[in-house]
Amino acid sequence: MKTINPSPKAIKAFTQDVVDNKAIVMVNILRFKDLADYGDGVVKNLSGREAYANYSKSVMPLLWEVGGQVLWRGDVRSTFIAPIEEQWDEVLLVQYPNRQAFIAMISSPAYKEAMQHRTAAIADSRLIETKSLRLPKMVLKLARQVVRIKRFVSPKI
């Protein structure tokens, strides 16, 4: 099923759900339209990727205002495990100080104005909220030591 924007029901549930005040990372998985469709009958001769770039330019200052940041962005090269109909173009990891910061951003008039570019650009998408899981530093240090020892002892292939 193609999903471009959240349903009113999903927005209501997301904004009313009580969660902790910890940082979140939103995983954005995107497939672009070949040509952006603004639905206004005016041909703008933009690709979906170009329309999404316009959305990104508009949203970046809003993201910074709420204390968010793009952690990582990548173009999809291949899909190794997924149904054949789920082919993607881009993945972004965007961190927010907490869910309330994300909600504040998407509720702003400036964001609602920028959404026209996203809607015109996207053929399908997924937006997944995640929270960080911190591993104790001692566990990470031990894991690194084991890997180093294994490399030293094991024959190279």
Image (cartoon, rainbow, N blue to C red):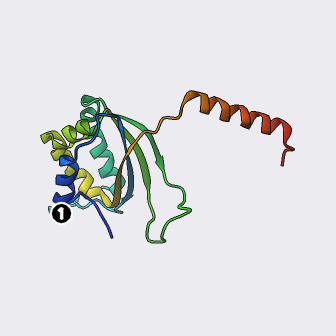
Q: Residues within 10 Å of mark 1 (few under 14, many from 20)?
A: few
Considering depth in this image, is 45 or 72 the residue closer to the camera? 72
Image point 60% across, 28% down: which residue? 138
Question: Looking at the picture, how far across and down is residue 117, in whole percent?
Answer: 24, 51
- Is there any visible trace of residue 78 in the rendered image? yes
Count of residue discs: 1
- Is there any visible trace of residue 45 in the rendered image? no
Q: Quadrant of residue 66?
A: top left
Quadrant of the rendering where the N terminus is positioned: bottom left
Q: Quadrant of residue 78?
A: bottom right
| Residue type (three-letter) at the residue carrying disc 1 | Gly
Considering depth in this image, is 32 or 133 the residue closer to the camera? 133
Vertical comparison of 83 with 48: above or below: below
Image point 48% across, 50% down: which residue? 75
Considering depth in this image, is 44 or 2 the residue closer to the camera? 2
Question: Looking at the picture, how far across and down is residue 146, in whole percent?
Answer: 73, 36
Question: Looking at the picture, how far across and down is residue 113, in whole percent?
Answer: 16, 46
Question: Looking at the picture, how far across and down is residue 76, in whole percent?
Answer: 49, 54
- In screen coordinates, is 26 left or right of 44? right
Q: Which secondary structure, mark 1?
A: loop
Task: Find disc 1 in the rendering and name its residue.
Answer: 39
Judged from this view, the residue extending furthest toward the left is 109
Image point 36% across, 53% down: which residue? 49
